[in-house]
Image (cartoon, rainbow, N blue to C red):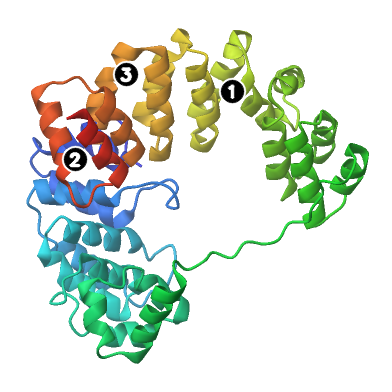
Amino acid sequence: MQPADTLHGQLQRGLGRGARRAAETPGAGELVYDCVRRDPRWDRQVESRSLFYARLLLDLELPVGPIAEHLAGTRGQGDTELSRDGLAVEVLADLLRLSRRDAAWPLRRYAEDGTHWYEALHALTEVGDPSLAQGLDEVAAARCDDEDLRWLVMEPDNAVVQDWVRRQPRIAAAVAERRAGGRPRLHCSHRPDCSGRSDAELLDQARLAGDAAVAAILELGRRRSPVLLDLAEELLAGEPGRYGGAVSRAIRDLGEVAVPRARVWTAHRTGCFDIGIAVLARHGTEEDVPALLDDLRAALRERNWGAAAGPAEGLGRLRSGTSVPLLKRVWAETEYAYLRPRLLGALIRTAPHTAENYATEGLWDCEEEVRQAAVAIAPPHRDNLLRIRRLRGCAAEDPDVRSAAALRL
């Protein structure tokens, strides 16, 4: 990833300052295309970028041709690291929601034989214009299994779906099932009931393998049993495996009772260090600010962005004024956009005036949580109010952001 003070680096990070700067920089379009092609997200599962880049393509009046060429070049590669076409599909889908109808034809081609064909098909369906999805009913019927079809017809009154129903019996059956049975269900694994066991019995069960051990750990957490502190030192000393998450969640639920032990874990950097920081972030006092600052500095130094959320939120909760310069630096440098809502929340608590400046930038941020928070506190300057009006009226915008914008106006 490019340095954070360059336009390229800011666009890669999805920073609002990059979006605003791009509008005044000749040649910025090539940097936008590069981001779409290479997908710079640190964690693709949770970070948002597609609407950010789609808006830039719209504002800079950039053609979709280079993205279409990119998708044509990735077809046939399969779902590999070299095939970074998922973001391009998402960007085209958002462009379509932004009324750029020229985004439809590359999506149509990709829906026929691309790796992420379902996303393209879903985007074309969601727009609700049968002329854009004409003939794709055959693709849907041929490529979708029954589960795919159930999700594709989530809105059975959609004009595209209704058009397809007349020609495709499988789609008609999926719509009938949808109307009869409601939303498709996600399957959840059954967890054993441990509520009738004593703490000692649960502790023994937690030392065993399998779902029963996880259930015992979570039940001890629900009871806020202090025996979890000793158990953590046993289970987290080596490779925690699947139990690490369960133990960490359970100990966080202990509340203030876990703070003294958490201080020991963080001071001696034991195998329980990470959960110790999480406890201090959630339940610590002003005494724990130095430990949280040190951990946030370490995350910045090591570029371990996933570890930065806990200490950042903790410093915000404790209203640590000394943390403000560090929070600002992490905001600018982090490659993990999903971290910025936590950073903005911390700045709002620790330095409200400074937070207003970051909220102004946040109105252009790639993360919807940042935009939502920014809408509420950005100063009522002319440019900010124009941006908030645009967010309120944008059909592709997150509903919570639109609601927050409407409330602000």
Q: CA distance from mark 1 to mark 3?
A: 20 Å
In the image, 199 versus 258, the foreground residue is 199
The numbered mark at residue 232 is: none
Task: Give coordinates of residue 162: x percent, y percent.
Answer: 24, 79
Q: Residues at badges 1 and 3 in contact (C-beta under 8 Å)?
A: no
In this figure, what is the number of numbered marks? Answer: 3
- Which of the two marks, 2 or 1, is nearer to us in this view? 2
Q: Which residue is mark 1?
A: 281
Q: CA distance from mark 2 to mark 1?
A: 33 Å
Callout 3 secondary element: helix
Q: Which residue is mark 2?
A: 391
Callout 1 secondary element: helix
Could you classify mark 1 by the number of other residues whose Cα lies within 10 Å: few (under 14), some (14-19), or many (20 or more)? many
The amino acid type found where label 2 is placed reads Leu
Q: Considering only order in the chain, which callout, 3 or 2, is on the residue closer to the N terminus?
A: 3
Q: Quadrant of the N terminus?
A: top left
The amino acid type found where label 3 is placed reads Ala
Task: Give coordinates of residue 273: x percent, y percent.
Answer: 69, 28
